[in-house]
Image (spheres, helix red, strand yellow):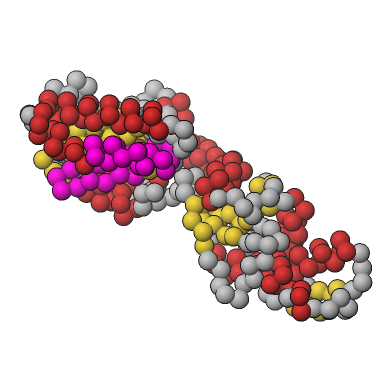
Amino acid sequence: MITDNNFKELARFSGPHSVSMYFPTGRVGQEEKSRIRAKNAVQLAARKLEKQFGLRPSQAEQFLQPAIDLFAEPEFWQDQSDGLAVFIGDGHFSHYACPIDFRSQVYVQQTFYVRPLISLVNEDPARFYLLSLSRDNIRLFETTEYSIQELEFAEEVPSNMAEALRIDDRSRGLTRAGAPGKKAGSNSVFFGRDADHDQENEEIKVFFDRVNDGVTSILCDDNAPLVLAGVEELIPIYREANSYAHLYEEDFMAGNVADKQPAELQEMAWNVVAPHFQEQYQRDLEKFEAKLANNEASFGVHTVIPAAINGRVEVLWVDKDHDSYGTYDEATNGVSLDPEQNDANSEELLERAARAAHASGAKVYNLPRTEMPRITSGICAIYRYNVDAQTTNL
């Protein structure tokens, strides 16, 4: 999985010629199709190196050899994600299995093409926490739409109910177990000779009280939603124990999750919490409409690209399935389009805008055209302040 540091390194790279390759791979059963896509990508990259930079076929093959060797290894294709990104430059070779179903793309220019990766490293990602609950195992994850990472509890936090209650050392008579960290009047639970079901629920409550203490000590003042996962009868018990302010109440991930792998948990949890982030996206769309009349938002390459390059964009939308080639003139702050790429200095302008916006801390959406504020344009933006389209570079 690519990290923000990886992304920044790729974004900074420049050389005499650089190759960026993207194609879908699939997680299971797509090995042969992936090998064919990889072979086609290498062949297309070689032709572009020859045409755009004048390399001889043998030079192009030598330049691409690290990828050729990697793609020839059968084991490489056995552990893939949804898509593969490969970067080859002067003294540089890297590749990343990514949870994105990339469209097949090959770019040959002096810098790496990184726009398809930007949703993985956004400053404001769709980030949330996932708490996997069972009587025998507790796991906490920091999660996004594309990634998942398990967090470690402090040693004093019990990992299972038996550990929390020390059942093996406890008699069946009247027992008092403290539940630290709760509000006054609820930090002690008494067990008597009641029905087994009632006693088990009380024991689970004691366990979850202690788990809650561990969760809140990790999350502290964070405001990302906490999604619960577990069999249905455990969820209301944990909700009663919870003191984290941003517990996701609208839904939970139902079922026995104790033995599920993190990647499977991430995918299932995202389906549960996605509506929360879709609401955030809807708010950005509404904000775009509200600011459009005051020149605090706009669409189109001639206005948005200069603003993005000069760090004036707060939120940027770019069409993930469209490229816009041309040149940007720093002296005039103007954009000239070159769809046929006849100018040797032409670059993919949506890539440059997205890269600059990300570097300045803007939120960047790389989306299909149908999900953008204006489906007639491949680029839209909300500005940090009023932007005059004719303003020259500062």
Q: Position of residue 45 (x, y in %)?
A: 21, 30
Would you say residue 306 sits in the magenta stretch? no
Quick one: 125 or 374, which is closer to the camera? Answer: 125
Q: Quadrant of residue 79?
A: top left
Quick one: 76 or 230, which is closer to the camera? Answer: 76
Q: Residue furthest top?
A: 340
| Side (left or right) of 261 relative to 388 | right
| Side (left or right) of 250 relative to 353 | right
| Side (left or right) of 360 relative to 213 | left
Q: Residue 299: in sight, yes or no?
A: no
Q: Which residues are magenta?
A: 68-96
Number of marks drawn: 0
Q: Quadrant of residue 108?
A: top left
Quick one: 322 or 266, which is closer to the camera? Answer: 266
Residue drawn at (15%, 38%) of the image: 63
Against 215, is 226 above or below? above
Quick one: 25 or 127, which is closer to the camera? Answer: 25
| Side (left or right) of 62 relative to 86 | left
Q: Residue furthest front?
A: 74
Q: Position of residue 127 (x, y in %)?
A: 50, 51
Q: Position of residue 265 (x, y in %)?
A: 57, 48
Residue drawn at (18%, 37%) of the image: 64
Q: Quadrant of residue 106?
A: top left
Residue drawn at (17%, 29%) of the image: 46
Would you say residue 73 sits in the magenta stretch? yes
Q: Residue 196: in sight, yes or no?
A: yes
Q: Position of residue 366 (x, y in %)?
A: 39, 36
Against 211, is 246 above or below? above
Residue drawn at (81%, 67%) of the image: 202
Against 32, is 275 above or below? below
